[in-house]
Image (tube, rainbow, N blue to C red):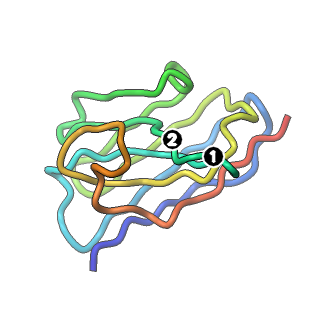
Amino acid sequence: QVQLVESGGGLVQAGGSLRLSCAASGRTFRRSPMCWFRQAPGKEREFVVVISTSGASTQYADAVKGRFTISRDNGNMVYLQMNDLKPEDTAVYYCAAGDVMSRFPEQYHYWGQGIQVTVSS
């Protein structure tokens, strides 16, 4: 059974940091681009960042560029380091895996259950 499980979320004050982790299991994702999306209450799911299979290529949403950093190991772990967090970063964050690097959620076949990140002002 394929599973993606996020961890590391929580409540943090504005300007603080959090590190999200995504553990994939059930198959190898070494050849899958992996990404993070987020969804705030009442809003559509929003692209955050994607990383290539090798980790050499990344794409960030403008809203998080310079503050968030994605990385992956050579196994099935993906990380999202979030610095200088802002209240507008408050959302449920989802890890996903697919076959191509994309900013569109429909391109990703496997999703985690999501984890809450709340940034207080």
* Element type at mark 1: loop
Quarter holding the N terminus?
bottom left
When the figure is inspected, residue 82 is found, relative to residue 37, above or below; the finding is: above
Q: Residues within 10 Å of mark 2 (few under 14, many from 20)?
A: some
When the figure is inspected, residue 26 is found, relative to residue 21, above or below; the finding is: below
* Element type at mark 2: strand
Quarter holding the C terminus?
top right
Amino acid under disc 2: Glu
Amino acid under disc 1: Lys
Q: Residue at x 56, y 24 (%)?
A: 63
Q: Position of residue 20 (x, y in %)?
A: 52, 49
Q: Are marks 2 and 1 in contact (CB under 8 Å)?
A: yes
Q: In the orientation shown, which residue stands out farthest toward the left?
A: 31
Q: Residue at x 51, y 41 (%)?
A: 46
Label 2 sits on residue: 46
> For residue 84, what is the image quadrant?
top right
Mark 2 to mark 1 CA distance (whole Å): 8 Å
Q: Position of residue 31 (x, y in %)?
A: 14, 50
For the image, the number of numbered tags is 2
Left or right: residue 73 versus residue 47 is left
Label 1 sits on residue: 43
Q: Residue at x 58, y 55 (%)?
A: 8
Q: Position of residue 41 (x, y in %)?
A: 69, 51
> For residue 35, what is the image quadrant?
top left
Left or right: residue 36 versus residue 53 is right
Which of 106 and 3 lies nearest the eye of the viewer? Answer: 106
Left or right: residue 114 versus residue 112 is right
Between disc 2 and disc 1, the foreground one is 1
